[in-house]
Image (spheres, rainbow, N blue to C red):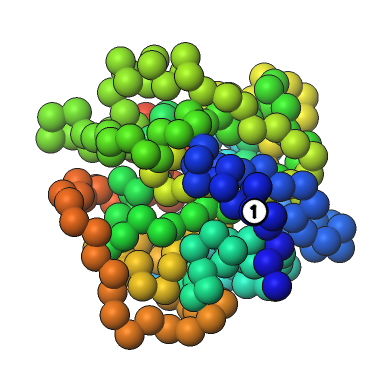
Amino acid sequence: MTLLTREQHDAFWRDGYLMVEEAVTPAQLAALRAEIVAWVEESRAHAQPFGPPTIDGRPRFDMGSEHSATKPALRRINNPSDISDAYREVMADARTVDMVADLIGPDVKFHHCKINLKLSGAKTEVSYHQDFAYTPHTNDDVVTALLFLDDVDEDNGCLTVVPGSHKGPMLSLFDGERFTGGVAPTEEKQALAKSVPCLGKAGSVCLMHTKLLHGSAANRSDASRGLYICVYSAADAVPIARNPMPSLNEGRILRGQEARFARLTEGLVELPKQPKSASFFTVLGQDSKQAAE
């Protein structure tokens, strides 16, 4: 039984994204938000990235350089499904996974997840990019589910997207030989002129095609803006670059069956430079908080 209507299915493939309300249960949303409150409180005691390390040895929790005990700027939790039952449940068993299966299934597997958090006063911005440039696969049946942990409006750093850009060319994230993590300034200016905001209540989800051009501005409000971001692929889409955020659950089949063959799409794929720091925000020029010498 499908969760998305034919109209929703067609809108996703036309525009490259789809907003759906009430994507998780109230109990699931409450559990996710409670974890955020606890992690933000824990971050007050730290002056640099911290936490149980990811499986590639990087800190789990990352804060912006403006972070302090009195004004936390926790901005990234890497693969929270590795350490939290609440986040693992939503990653694997929420209605969002069934929506993804409606779009690229029936066979769906997990790639990675993260939380991007913009607390009040945080300076975090996301330069325009296409996710496929970070996580290239043998085909582009890859969907990112961005679950709203808070009410999202145009003042608290909402996601902005360029409708239809998933059908266009892949844009380079390099400036010469330097990996910048974002498109060139001229291309970003053009993207901003065409972009639309993704707004909604907590519990809504934005289902986004991996090649959709998107970004977000800093939080200018007093309200937090958190996204739980899970990346899924068709079972026959095989990564051709190292996962920038390897997980204990990477490759886990969540719906349907494991693929026997990889499905290949012809073309050239620019390979990314994977971040070695706690989060890709440092690649974008936004330093992590570091303890004073």
Q: Residue at x 41, y 59 (%)?
A: 141
Q: Mark 1 Cα within 10 Å, few/some/many (few <14, many 20+)?
A: few
Label 1 sits on what residue type? Arg
From the viewer's perspective, tell me whether residue 270 is left or right of residue 204.
left
* Quadrant in which the N terminus appears: bottom right
- The location of residue 80, given as percent across then percent down, is 59, 62
**For the point 42% across and 21% down, which residue is it?**
191
Horizontal side of residue 293 vs 207, given as left or right: left
Relative to 90, say whether 222 is above or below: above
Q: Position of residue 66 (x, y in %)?
A: 56, 28
Q: Is residue 121 above or below residue 209?
A: above
Residue occupying image coordinates x 65% and y 47%: 7
Above-or-below relation of 262 to 9: below
Q: Residue furthest right?
A: 26
For mark 1, what is the residue? 6
In the depicted view, which residue is nearer to us: 59 or 87? Answer: 87
Q: Quadrant of residue 190?
A: top left
Where residue 107 appears, as percent x and y from the top left, is: 49, 75
Can I make out residue 286 in this image?
Answer: no
Which is nearer the eye, 179 or 56? 179
